[in-house]
Image (tube, rainbow, N blue to C red):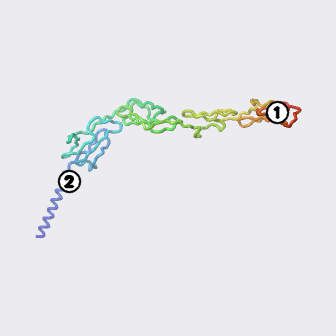
Amino acid sequence: MMRLLIVSLVVLAAVVTVSEAKKRKKIPTCDNKNLANTQRPVCTKPLVKGRFEKGTSCTWTCNHGCVWVMGPRTRYCKGRPGVWKKSVGNGYQKAKGIKCSCRSCTDQPGDWPGAAGHDCAPMSSYSYGTHCDYHCPTGYNQVGIAERLCLNGRWVDEDEGFECIDIDECAEGTDDCSDDATCTNTPGSFTCACNDGFSGDGVTCTDINECADGTDNCDDGATCDNTDGSFTCSCPDGFILADDDLSCEPEPTGEMPTVMPTADTV
């Protein structure tokens, strides 16, 4: 009796196992067929052995640079043995996947206001999804991003706060002007000009010897002394510089000198 009971239990267990295995095999699934010009779908259930289980919903998007033309973006795995359907009202209808249009751009990307150019080489045709990034001219700092995308045969602007801001090389100290020159900022660049008393191109400045050149304006009775970028006038003993710093006058001793300084006596 005990042996018969054991045999019966073993048979029952085997039947249950086979039945459950058959149920598992009969779970409806849908194919994972790739749709043309689409990215990998986002699905509510994982892919198992190359198929999606019934009840899975997947959403497809067109490849970058393509545009949706027709067909449901989201489909649902329904029925037996498992087919993709779209939602219609309160029900579902069998449906093919989305259709995307992907055309190349035959025009050039063109200019961007304020930009110096872009990184796309000149071509007769640009494939869909091509990005051309624009950059600022030399002497400007770039803020944000400016690019054009080839979207199904036409160029579309993608502006993220793009702006070119002039660099003030003079204020930042990145100019190469001489220490004896004045730096002036200009749009995208700067200029250098030698200070008074110096000559040169602004990058290199040389002191002008006004005394040797005779361009000083010291009085005939005064001596010209060259200084860096200028000159000074001095007087002989018994005389001092007048308020104009150019001519000489007697020292205030209370007595007039017998001889006023001249060019011959200095």
Within 10 Å of disc 1 (Cα), the crowding (few <14, some 14-19, many 20+) is some
Instruction: Find residue 51 and report its horizontal and vertical position in percent.
Output: 25, 47
* Circle number at residue 249: 1
Which residue is label 2 attached to?
Answer: 24
Front position in the image: 61 or 19: 61
Give the structural element (helix, strand or loop) at label 2. Answer: helix
Left or right of residue 154, residue 72 in this image: left
Instruction: Find residue 234 and report its horizontal and vertical position in percent.
Output: 79, 35
Q: Quadrant of the C terminus?
A: top right
Left or right of residue 77, residue 147 in this image: right
Q: In the rendered view, would you say 179 is above or below 54? A: above
Instruction: Farthest residue to the right: give it.
Output: 258
Image-quadrant location for residue 10: bottom left
* Circle number at residue 129: none
Total count of labels: 2
Give, as a three-letter code, the residue at label 1.
Glu
Measure how far apart labels 1 and 2 are at the Cα level: 122 Å
Residue shown at the point (44%, 37%) measured from the top left = 161
Image-quadrant location for residue 128: top left
Front position in the image: 148 or 167: 167
Instruction: Find residue 88 and report its horizontal and vertical position in percent.
Output: 21, 40
Left or right of residue 5, residue 82 in this image: right
Residue shown at the point (44%, 36%) measured from the top left = 146
Which of the two discs, 1 and 2, sits closer to the camera?
Answer: 1
Image-quadrant location for residue 99: top left
Q: Quadrant of the N terminus?
A: bottom left
Instruction: Find residue 259 and report its horizontal and vertical position in percent.
Output: 88, 32
Instruction: Farthest residue to the front: give it.
Output: 254
Front position in the image: 193 or 60: 193
Give, as a three-letter code, the residue at label 2.
Arg
Of the image marks 1 and 2, the number of the one nearer the N terminus: 2
